[in-house]
Image (cartoon, rainbow, N blue to C red):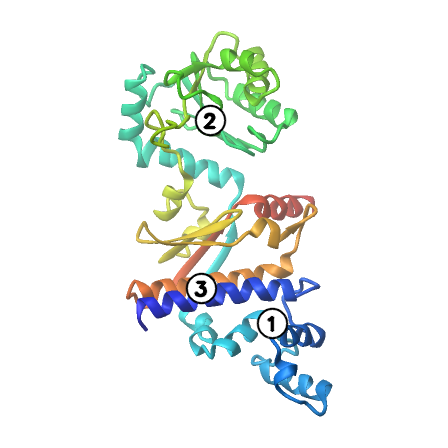
Amino acid sequence: MSEHLTSNLLEVRNTLHHVLRQVDSNGDGYIDKDELYFLLDRVGTFKKAKWSNLHETLDKLLAGLDTNSDGFVDIQEFIDWVLLDTRASGTSQSLQVKHVFLSAEDEARMERIALFELESKENNDILVRAGLGELTDPKRLLLSVGSSSTQAYDAKGLTLSVPTGTKVANAGALQELISAIQRAGRTYEQILLINSIGYFVEPTDPALVALDELARRDPHGPAHRFNEALVKAFPKASMRIYNRAKDPGTKRYKFPQLSNDFSLSLTKACGLPMGVLDFHPDIIVDWGGSSYKVFIDGKRIGTEVMDANSFLCEGGILHRERIPQAIKEIECSVMALLEMEGLDTFMKKVLIAQTGKARELALSTECQS
């Protein structure tokens, strides 16, 4: 199959999924008679053909579409019928898929591996040029403050993660992080805040901005929250934010950024939990909140939009019954991408590592049960 045709097939498949999700009024991932009637009516089927017994015909059509004889017609079966694509029905035989929710601690551990091991030379050079000393300095605490979570690492192996950040104000989680750091019994002369909090610094600012300075500029912002909590806990430490602002002209970061992207470790299978590591994946899918990225041999071969936050999560509830359908979509996408790359698909092992809001809901539910 040509690259152009495969690309078009993937586009049509994704479009059909989007349309059918809207048709699937009860969100159960299956098409019932009423939903099928609505779909066929919208595309003009009933205007083009005169059916003598509409309900009987719909029953026969639904029975014919139920290719796995489970008594239901799922969205994937319907799409396979529409596209007359037998390759998709063989996906489960061609790919071995393992889906896991990576814990916040797993993600933090992989971030630390990327920061201190995989990208150590580049990160060390950035710190030295900024006048902060070597990456291996045991007197430095790094806080990676993202939009909804914060990770803490140091050169001696500290790795922590809590659900608070620039957009999520959680005083209890921040205090939990500080208490855990204090329990480690380490003394820090330097605390460096990186990641999303650096967006609150101006492009005209230098590479390093004092945390209390940014707190004074915005008394209601995230810098103020972190400054209040950290000053009480580490009054003698120098606290600075690394500038993440982008140049208005070039739209690029004004300063080179420290690399602690957990997906770098993920694609190299570094730091995965033992049960996952034993799977020995050939292909890794990094599935976040709004999209997923597909990697093979550390190379990204595709990025697809899939808003798991809205499709799987609703009102603080994770709809686990929708997960198989979403995974099926990812499988089909991976198959198409592999074919575009001219790669064999037989018995390939695919690890789908999911984070984001669905992960938080899934793991919090498991903890409560």
Q: Nearer the viewer, residue 95 or 276?
A: 95
Residue 289 lies, with reference to residue 341, above or below; the image says above
Element at label 1: loop
Q: Position of residue 111 (x, y in %)?
A: 42, 36
Residue 218 lies, with reference to residue 108, above or below; the image says above
* Left or right side of 351 for 130: left
Q: Amino acid at mark 2?
A: Tyr
Which of the two discs, 2 and 1, labels the residue nearer the N terminus?
Answer: 1
Between marks 3 and 2, how big is the CA–CA gap? 34 Å
Q: Position of residue 340 (x, y in %)?
A: 32, 64
Residue placed under numbered mark 1 in the picture: 74
Residue 284 lies, with reference to residue 84, above or below; the image says above
**How many numbered circles are shown?**
3
Q: Which mark is residue 11?
A: 3
Element at label 2: helix
Element at label 3: helix
Q: Amino acid at mark 3?
A: Glu
Q: Position of residue 47 (x, y in %)?
A: 64, 82
Q: What quarter of the picture does the N terminus occupy?
A: bottom left
